[in-house]
Image: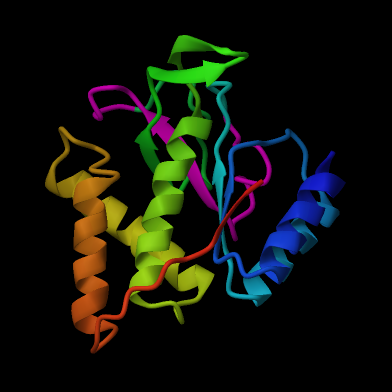
Amino acid sequence: PYSQIASAIIYAADHGAQVINMSLGGSSPSSTLQNAINYAISKNVVSVAAAGSGGTSPLVYPAAYPEVISVGALTGDFTTKASYSNYGQNLDIMAYGTSYTTLMGGGYGAGWLATSYSCPYISGLVALVKSYNSSLTPQRISDYITQFWQIFRHCEPQRSNLGTYTQNSWIASSLRSSQRPEFKPSRPKFAKV
């Protein structure tokens, strides 16, 4: 239920988390969930959520909220949206999310596909940005990430994501040189909900 997710968001915000990764979702909005996300924002906590893995539009909640950085999935060649990835107007960015091998139920599973696997890449990117300038607001961080996403998509259309390493380097370099005169990285606290 959303009330449990909302409680976890509030708990994370109250206990020092700077980035909340939410690899989960539901099909309907909730004022309880929305209020918890707004509470986290008031504490300068960035929320990142998986767009959903139904291959449909719109996004699932909480990714559908404009205050949340929503993450879709790319195919293994990083050039197109994965067929299972949800999409829509509020989709902010995409990252690799195809063919993961994970430990499930005591054994290995192969070929897992989900935006839940894409979401932590972007949560890591947010943590990198926060480590360079922890005073940036969640909105400012979202703006940086989505602006760089658009730039890279147009600069190298055959690589529509550049969603992790290269993009991290460019964003971090930009923040270091123009937003913060001295470099003092910190270690952001994570909360996985």
Residue 96 location, quadrant: top left
Q: Closer to the camera, 186 or 121?
A: 186
* Residue 50: image location, x then y, percent: 55, 39
Q: How many marks?
A: 0
Q: Is residue 98 left or right of residue 2?
A: left
Q: Is residue 15 left or right of residue 44?
A: right
Q: Residue at x 27, y 40 (%)?
A: 161
Point out the stretch of residues depicted in magenta.
57-80
Q: Residue at x 41, y 48 (%)?
A: 122
Residue at the far front in the pictured view: 106
Instruction: Pick the quarter of the image with the N terminus.
Output: top right
* Residue 17: image location, x then y, percent: 60, 64
Residue 11 location, quadrant: bottom right
Q: Closer to the camera, 79 or 2?
A: 2
Examine the structure image and report whether residue 75 is included in the region drawn in magenta: yes
* Residue 185: image location, x then y, percent: 33, 74
- Is residue 108 placed above or below 41 in the rendered structure? above
Q: Residue at x 32, y 60 (%)?
A: 147
Examine the structure image and report whether residue 48 is included in the region drawn in magenta: no
Q: Is residue 170 left or right of residue 85?
A: left
- Is residue 136 placed above or below 24 in the rendered structure? below
